[in-house]
Image (spheres, rainbow, N blue to C red):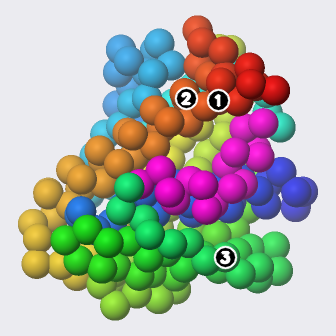
Amino acid sequence: MNHASRSLGSLTRATFALSFLAAVFVVPSAAMADGDPDVSVGKDGTIDGTVVVGAPPDVVQSYLADVRSLRTHSKDVVSVDIVRDGECQLVTTLAKSLVELTYVARRCPTATGYVETLLDSEMMNDYYAEWFVTPVSSGIEIRFRMRTDLNLPVPGRIIRSTIKSNVTRSLELMQKYLGGPHAPPSQVAAD
């Protein structure tokens, strides 16, 4: 497994932690055809989102590898601690909104991105997130899929709606930073 694959796994975990407290691609839409972020919620509650970015593959890899930065796309994330575990990372995320939520997830590289699985949390029964990175004619498509089961006295539809909003915001920030099919990446332009 190469360094790029390992880094993509780390990025997947970071983005997934967008915000479980306030509390990603099933049907293509017209927005997706333009490369804009597209996020949906499947019948099983899985959040599925995609975005097309214009940055070179090495810049996309570095961006997705920075799990701390990805997690802080959510305003509710207070801290992110990372411990190396072989080729993987153990990522402890603390988020505060209506309640305080801490969870530990293992983030590992895959052949196409990253995968995160829940190791420990008092308020989460399940957490699974996966990032997929695919070259397309207009740039690089980043797809994020996430499934969670929270132990909160809040209806599931409200939690899913909040997570969907956070994933949409994260993908918009990614596209702003990494550029889109019709816009230069701000990160590359700043160099």
Amino acid type of the residue tagged 2 in the rendering: Gln
Left or right placement of residue 102 versus residue 15 in this view:
left
Highlighted magenta segment, given as a residue range:
59-74
Q: CA distance from mark 2 to mark 1?
A: 5 Å
Q: Residue at x 23, y 63 (%)?
A: 23
Residue 12, image x, y percentages: 59, 56
Q: Residue at x 34, y 79 (%)?
A: 101
Magenta-colored stretch includes residue 161: no
Q: Which residue is mark 3?
A: 82
Residue 147, image x, y percentages: 38, 62
Q: Rate crowding at label 1 as few (under 14), some (14 to 19) or many (20 or more) other CA atoms within 10 Å.
A: many
| 110 vs 123: above or below | above
Residue 7, image x, y percentages: 76, 56
Q: CA distance from mark 3 to mark 2?
A: 25 Å
Amino acid type of the residue tagged 1 in the rendering: Leu
Left or right placement of residue 39 versus residue 72 in this view:
left
Proximity of marks 2 and 1: CB atoms separated by less than 8 Å: yes
Q: Quadrant of residue 136?
A: top right
- Mark 3: which secondary structure? strand
Q: Quadrant of residue 156?
A: bottom left
Q: Which residue is mark 2?
A: 175
Q: Rate crowding at label 3 as few (under 14), some (14 to 19) or many (20 or more) other CA atoms within 10 Å.
A: some
Count of labels shown?
3
Q: Which residue is mark 1?
A: 178
Amino acid type of the residue tagged 3 in the rendering: Ile
Q: Residue at x 14, y 57 (%)?
A: 157
Q: Is residue 42 visible?
A: no
